[in-house]
Amino acid sequence: MIVLLGVLVVVLGFATRRNPLLVVGVAGIVTGLLGKLSPVEILRTFGDSFASSRSVTIFAITLPVIGLLERNGLQQQARTLIGKLGKLTTGRFLTLYLFLRQLTAAVGLQTIGGPAQSVRPMIAPMAEAAAERQNGGRPLPERLREKVRSHASGSDTVGLFFGEDCFLAVGSILLITGFVNSTYDTHLEPLQLALWAIPSAVCAFLIHGARLLRLDRTLERELAASNAGFTAHDGGNAAQEKVT
Amino acid sequence: MIQSEWFFWLVGGVFLLMALQMSVDRSNPKRLGSTVFWGLLGACFIYSSWVTDKTAPAEPLGVAVLVMICVGGFGLTGKGVPRTTDEKERTALAARWGNKLFLPALTVPLVAVVCATLVDKVRIGGEPVLEDGSETILGLGLGALAGLGVGMWVLRERRISVPVHAGRGLLESMGWALLLPQLLAVLGAIFQEAGVGTQVGKITESVLPDGQRLAAVALYCVGMAVFTLIMGNAFAAFPVMTAAVGWPVLIEQMDGNPAAVLAIGMLAGFCGTLCTPMAANFNLVPAALLELKDQYGPIKAQVPTAIPLLGCNIALIYFFAF
């Protein structure tokens, strides 16, 4: 029973945001000692399981080719491609981005998107511009602007999470095989796991995509409501001040 | 026949080469720590070959792992100023290369999948070309090499040092986080060795009514999501919940398909990541980058997706994994 304190060390360590490496190291040693392993046995377990879980870290081998492509403008080219989707409504644009993000992550291109790489410079401004078009070119009330930007970030994150696991060499898939194969002495292939990630990826696209499409209607309704009292001024700034 | 160990030596060799580059990189304020960390990792990758076939003791490797944990954990690694192109040059280069840039990137998964599905059947003189049971890993290695070759050809890059430097830049910016998944796998093994799994399994069995498959599936998925909410990291939740419920109950006791249970279980954990400020890099950093007043804006946009999606994952395991 007392070995469960090791789990507690992990939970507390991560929850109090200690350095994860140290949390893992301390939890490993504590759990080993509580489980009545001798210090030498603990070292041996660290060594043996490190050796048998090396496959988790091999995705590093793709870094040179990704680095080469990034220094030659891979992210910029991805942005150019997305820029061609300019004339859609906010919801449709974000749905398409969600789809592209899932698709590219599923073939191992997790780094071409992300909050700093694509959302801030591309996706959020374009989603906002589309909503402003819907608002007759006026700036959005602050609350709606925040909502559109939040959704831009959300579609990036959902797309990444539920796309990357369809790629067989992503950290989480390799963690599963590394953990299970070294712990339970069995054999799981990354490809099987990647295939089983596809149904969830489809569900994620359907659920999140439907919500993004509904965002268009929400925007329409709320923009109509917030503009209703301001036809006399017809000024976006006035509307914005009123709402904030 | 191509052995998986060769490929681990290649990865180890790349780490060692990059460590060597780091040791002479004066722009890195912590180059000693970085060199020790990545050099040791490369050496461990190679030494491990003899540990897995039991011709070398595992204890020195355990010591080396603890040293890496300390070097990375106490912030002794750093990064240099990468020798690379700036934003403006990249825009110009992107315009020059166009969509050709995606070609090498797509080569990697393509070769990996072909190796895992087709080449693994190929035999020469009765021997499989790729070592049995390592097709995916070898496929990834061959894919990465092929992608690099295609990339250097398409981009007319003759110097191998350029991709190695570029890769080292990415390695340094990921830092010790790159090693975290593997260490979590190690922690899982220690949990198992110390009997954590059996203990939690006993508790689960006493809590769960016998043969209640739906309850067990829901416990696994919700547990993954809740642990991830608390810890901010599905990777950390995975060894705990899998040792507790996933493996002993769903797979051994109820005979579930391991690939389906574990892959979808991990994704159930990701539903938790969508809802937690603990996963700062995914949820709080974007709010700051987008200058949002409400730093929980992205989380609020994601929660209504995460909850039904968790339900979907439970249903997927329940209906398809048994």
Image: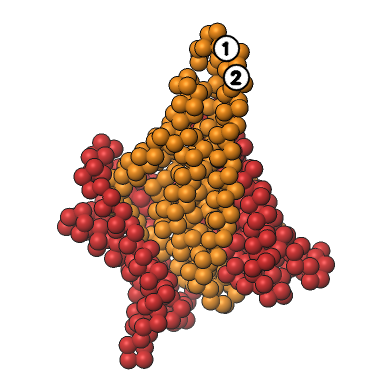
In the rendered image, which residue does mark 2 sit on? A226
Chain under callout 2: A
- Kindly identify the residue that appears in the image at 47 percent across and 81 percent down: B54
User: Mark 2 and mark 1 in contact (Cβ < 8 Å)?
Assistant: yes
Hey, what amino acid is under mark 2?
Ser
- Quadrant into which the C terminus of chain B falls: bottom right
The subunit carrying tag 1 is A
A196 left or right of A108? right
Badge 2 element: helix
Look at the image and give the colour of chain B.
Answer: red
At 60% from the left edge and 74% from the top edge, which residue is drawn?
A: A184
Could you tell whether B261 is left or right of B7 in the image? Answer: right
SS for callout 1: loop
Q: Nearer the viewer, residue A98 or A62?
A: A98
Is residue A73 visible to the viewer in this orientation of the structure? Answer: yes
Q: Which mark is residue A230?
A: 1
Q: Position of residue A170 (x, y in %)?
A: 46, 59
Give the position of the N terminus of chain B as an image quadrant.
Answer: bottom left
Q: In this rendered view, identify the residue nearer to me: B170 or B263.
A: B263
Q: Is residue B113 above or below residue B298?
A: below
Q: Nearer the viewer, residue B60 or A223?
A: A223
Residue B94, located in which quarter of the rendered image? top left
- Which residue is drawn at the image coordinates 46% and 26% (left, top)? A133
Q: Residues within 10 Å of mark 1 (few under 14, many from 20)?
A: some
In the rendered structure, the colour chosen for chain A is orange
- Is B127 displayed left or right of B269 in the figure? left
Residue B75 locus on image (x, y percent): 46, 47
For marks 1 and 2, give the CA distance: 8 Å
Tell me how many marks there are: 2
